[in-house]
Image (tube, rainbow, N blue to C red):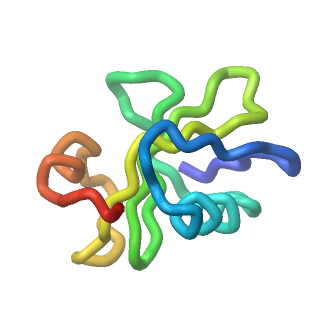
Amino acid sequence: MRVDFGKRFAVKDLGNHSAATVVSLALFVACPVDANPDSDYPGFYEIETASEIFYVYVPPRGGTIFLIAALENTDGPSPGRPIAQTIEDRTEVD
C-alpha cells in the first residue's frame, strides 16, 4: 500500500533507538512509501527499506510518526510477510 505521511510530520522514538535510526526513518518517509498496514492494529505499519524494517504507529490525524521498533533487514525487501513474524524472526537493530 502506498502511503503519504504528509509534507510536515515529526518522528517520535518510543524506544531507545539511535538518532541515526530516527533520522533514517524520517528521510525515508519524506516521500510517499510502500507500507504494509497491520491488519490487527489500525494505524500501525511496517515500512521496509533495503537495510531496515521499521514498525510505526501513525494516529488518524497524522502529523506524528511513532517509531515502535527498528529491525535489521537481513533478507532484503519481502512484501506481504506478516508483521508479527517479521518482528519475532529478527533482532533489534539498536
Res. 33 in view:
no
Res. 91 in view:
yes
> At which x and y percent is residue 10?
75, 44
Relative placement, left or right, of 56 versus 9 is: left
Q: Nearer the viewer, residue 38 or 10?
A: 10
Q: Nearer the viewer, residue 89 or 42?
A: 89
As drawn, which residue projects farthest toward the right? 7
Q: Nearer the viewer, residue 83 or 21?
A: 21
Q: Residue at x 49, y 37 (%)?
A: 14
> In the figure, 85 relative to 89: above or below?
above
Relative placement, left or right, of 49 versus 72 is: right
Q: Residue at x 38, y 47 (%)?
A: 69
> In the figure, 39 relative to 3: above or below?
above
> At which x and y percent is residue 40?
33, 23
Relative placement, left or right, of 41 versus 42 is: left
Relative placement, left or right, of 83 versus 69 is: left
Q: Residue at x 27, y 57 (%)?
A: 92
Q: Residue at x 49, y 61 (%)?
A: 18
> At which x and y percent is residue 41?
39, 23
> In the figure, 77 relative to 88: above or below?
below
Quadrant for the C terminus in the image: bottom left
> At which x and y percent is residue 45?
47, 41
User: Where, by quadrant of the figure, is residue 54 drawn?
Assistant: bottom left
